Image: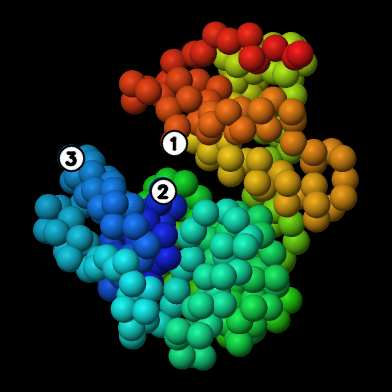
Amino acid sequence: MKKVAVIGAGTMGNGIAHTFAQFGFEVSLIDIAQASLDKGLATIQKNLDRMVAKEKISEQDKQDTLGRITSFTSMKDGLAGVELVVEAATENIDLKLKIFKDLSEMTPENVILASNTSSISITKIASVTNRADKVIGMHFMNPVPVMKLVEIIRGYSTSDEVTEIIMETSKKLNKVPVEVNDYPGFVANRILMPMINEAIYTLFEGVAGVEEIDTVMKLGMAHPMGPLQLADFIGLDVCLAILEVLHEGFGNPKYAPCPLLVNMVTAGKKGVKSGEGFYSWTHGTKELIVSNNFKKK
């Protein structure tokens, strides 16, 4: 496998494109908005500059990586000659189903179609294609160039051959792939999201404040960051979407999103991406927000 297309130039998409290109793959980075492509490419360059500064790669490595990425606003043009497509669009099931239906029609049947979805059923995504055996999940972690884990999710019909190809491809990216089956939330988010949701409930019910909750989990449980800060990094809208998938998929009230989370997303407070969540990120670093909105009403 030499040529890969990545659909979506946002946080996950540009990170996935960066990683494939850094390890020698030719990458087509596809997004309908030129502004998103420009921003994604600028992020890739900034992250590569940081790696050069830390002497993890050379200046030549950086230039070679950038030279292997070509951006496209036309999906048809960007898909030409690719052997693998990794979709990294917004966590919206209707959008993903449309993308995979289009991919199925625009690519030869031997092309593997992967989704970076963090919770949506691979089996359901595969159902709109003409190659359910070649549809698989590649759930990268953020930031993609740094984090080692890739959840490899097998849909109901995903073949052993395709699973093995994607496992080996992930290893070529210097990642550690873990094979899991297709159930809501897979492994990572089935465990992580209820913890984040419970932390939000703890705040909502006035048990403790933002910093206190995060400090308990960092110092008491040896987590590198607290669950509320982590939620800001993931995106509160993404956390809400995943919890809704878990709640619908299992029908268990323990997965019901906390009302505070729902209200924050409705108000546009999505974490780092919007500049404000449980912390303020408007100056590039986190600052504690003191707000009565974090108290139960």
- Horizontally, is 78 left or right of 179 in the view? left
Q: Residue at x 27, y 65 (%)?
A: 71
Label 1 crowding class (10 Å Cα cut-off): few <14, some 14-19, many 20+?
some
CB atoms at circles 1 and 2 under 8 Å apart?
yes
Q: Amino acid at mark 1?
A: Lys
Q: Amino acid at mark 3?
A: Ala
Is any atom of residue 269 visible in this view? Answer: yes
Give the residue number, with chain letter if any, for mark 2. 11
Would you place residue 149 above or below residue 213 in this image? below
Res 66 quadrant in image: bottom left
Dot 3 alpha-carbon crowd within 10 angstroms: few under 14, some 14 to 19, many 20 or more: few
Q: How is the image coloured?
A: rainbow
The local secondary structure at tag 2 comes to helix
* Residue receiving disc 1: 273
Q: Earlier in the sequence, mark 1 or mark 3?
A: 3
- Which sits in the foreground, 289 or 61? 289
Q: Secondary structure at mark 1?
A: helix
Single out the mark in the foreground, 1 or 2.
Answer: 1
Q: Is residue 231 among the parts visible in the rendering?
A: no
Which quadrant holds the N terminus?
A: bottom left
Secondary structure of the residue carrying numbered label 3 = helix
Q: Earlier in the sequence, mark 1 or mark 2?
A: 2
Amino acid type, mark 2? Thr
The answer to whether 100 appears left or right of 47 in the picture is right
Label 1 to label 2, Cα distance in Å?
A: 9 Å
Report the disc number at residue 53: 3
- At x 84%, y 38%, the residue is 254
Task: Please identify the quarter of the rendering in which residue 154 is found.
Answer: bottom right
Q: Which numbered disc, 1 or 3, marks the residue closer to the eye?
A: 1
Which one is earlier in the sequence, the residue at label 2 or at label 3? 2
Is disc 2 in contact with disc 3, using a CB cutoff of under 8 Å?
A: no
Q: CA distance from mark 2 to mark 3?
A: 21 Å
